[in-house]
Image (cartoon, helix red, strand yellow):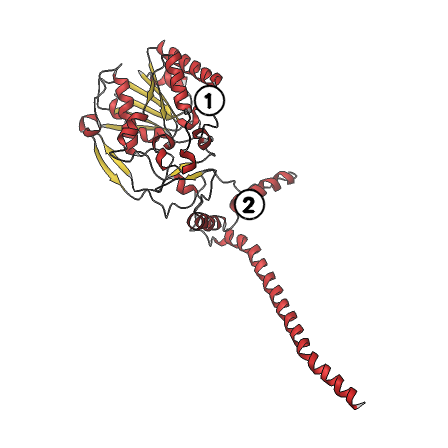
């Protein structure tokens, strides 16, 4: 009997450490569960607190589109309010900008890839290119979206019709395409985008216009390609040319117009004062919230010679939205008057084109506006469009 009691006591003593161990494990598990719950609750509450107290106000939105505002509740339209609030919260929840900034930093600096591959393509030597979110520009470069013969014919017919309509009013018409950076700096594209040999949509359209119409098409690519050995002509971090590239395009455009209007000044690059600008961040790195880290140091002030001075005399709100139109007065009294319509590339062209004309009206428009033709009575009309948007000319 005594031996049985000793055996039982031995078993009890041997089991006690295991019991205490189980209790410790359970206690740690409860603490861990409790802490996890607290952290989860904090994660749920923090976005709301940030919306009220603006803890992450230093992180600004980098989106170009206007964010959805807080909807107004109108009973009984409960479902529409819920839908509107859902969209509002997706775009405005607390810490959203800060979280995207951290995500973007990790993708770019740690993984070495684009945080927004559909918006921005990472090139070589610090170059960035627009991605497929902009008119499928990357696919266009790879030859995956060529303009069809039917589309080319339709665009040519529309441009020819506009030319003839303006010619009937004594107005000369010119068509200009602003090249994408893909066309001017292909050597800095990623390797997989350099191993292609296709005819670009711009070359397809140029060939069709040359063979089937007499529309004055001004190709500024040769001027931009030649000039880049002297100065950089496009922004590394932007979808546009820089001010020097804009000047080279302007000189190419006015050289062609001078064939019909000899009174235009015959100014060249050497007549301008070109001053470098540093510390610029382009729209592509702004989209990725990397604009504080990546600055493009290659931009310029381009100052025309004194005889070609001009001044802005009016800014006119654009009824279609976008930036306002600009009216200029130039110092070349014998030069013709200009009406220039185009896209965002026109913004920089407004700093160089007016100095060649007696007066100029520069505006954002993807078509030739007959109301401006009537009101401005220009002698010269120029339509500009960026290369990636050529397909839009079917709606001209």
Q: Is residue 302 left or right of residue 84?
A: left
Q: Quadrant of residue 296?
A: top left
Q: Which quadrant, please, contains the N terminus?
A: bottom right
Q: Residue at x 55, y 56 (%)?
A: 43
Q: Of 222 and 85, which appears nearest the observer? A: 222
Indicate the position of residue 91 as horizontal and vertical percent values.
Answer: 52, 43
Indicate the position of residue 5 as horizontal and vertical percent values.
Answer: 77, 87
Q: Quadrant of residue 41?
A: bottom right
Q: Please determine whether, in this image, residue 368 is positioned above or below residue 102.
A: above
Q: Please determine whether, in this image, residue 300 is positioned above or below residue 21.
A: above
In this rendering, the label closer to the viewer, 2 or 1: 1
Q: Secondary structure at mark 1?
A: loop
Q: Which quadrant, please, contains the C terminus?
A: top left
Q: Is residue 238 left or right of residue 258?
A: right
- Tag 2 residue: 89
- Pointer 1: residues within 10 angstroms few (<14), some, or many (20+)? some
Q: Looking at the rendered structure, which numbered label has been put on residue 147?
A: 1
């Amino acid at each position: 009997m005594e031996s049985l009691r000793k055996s039982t006591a031995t078993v009890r003593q041997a089991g006690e450490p295991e019991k205490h161990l189980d209790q410790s494990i359970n206690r740690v598990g409860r603490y861990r569960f409790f802490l996890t719950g607290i952290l989860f609750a904090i994660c749920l509450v923090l976005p709301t607190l940030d919306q009220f107290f603006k803890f992450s106000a230093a992180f600004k939105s980098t989106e170009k589109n206007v964010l959805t505002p807080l909807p107004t509740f109108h009973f009984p339209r409960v479902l529409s309010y819920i839908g509107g609030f859902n969209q509002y919260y997706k775009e405005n929840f607390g810490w959203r900008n800060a979280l995207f900034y951290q995500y973007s930093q990790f993708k770019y600096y740690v993984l070495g890839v684009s945080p927004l591959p559909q918006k921005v393509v990472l090139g070589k030597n610090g170059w960035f290119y627009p991605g497929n979110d902009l008119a499928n520009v990357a696919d266009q470069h790879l030859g995956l979206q060529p303009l069809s013969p039917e589309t080319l014919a339709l665009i040519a017919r529309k441009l020819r019709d506009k030319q003839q309509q303006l010619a009937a009013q004594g107005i000369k018409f010119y068509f200009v395409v602003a090249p994408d950076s893909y066309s001017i700096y292909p050597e800095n594209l990623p390797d997989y985008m350099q191993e292609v040999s296709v005819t670009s949509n711009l070359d397809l359209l140029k060939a069709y216009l040359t063979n089937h119409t007499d529309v004055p098409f001004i190709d500024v690519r040769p001027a931009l390609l030649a000039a880049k050995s002297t100065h950089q002509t496009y922004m590394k971090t932007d979808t546009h040319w820089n001010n020097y590239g804009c000047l080279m395009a302007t000189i190419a455009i006015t050289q062609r117009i001078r064939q019909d209007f000899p009174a235009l000044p015959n100014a060249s690059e050497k007549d301008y004062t070109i001053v470098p600008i540093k510390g610029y961040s382009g729209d592509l790195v702004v989209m990725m919230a990397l604009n504080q880290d990546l600055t493009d140091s290659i931009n310029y002030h381009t100052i025309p010679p004194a005889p070609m001075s001009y001044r802005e005399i009016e800014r006119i709100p654009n009824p279609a939205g976008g930036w306002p139109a600009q009216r200029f007065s130039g110092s070349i009294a014998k030069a013709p008057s200009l009406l220039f319509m185009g896209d965002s590339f026109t913004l920089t062209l407004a700093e160089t084109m007016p100095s060649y004309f007696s007066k100029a009206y520069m505006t954002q428009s993807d078509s030739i506006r007959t109301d401006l033709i009537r009101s401005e009575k220009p002698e010269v009309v120029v339509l500009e469009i960026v290369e990636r948007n050529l397909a839009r000319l079917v709606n001209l």
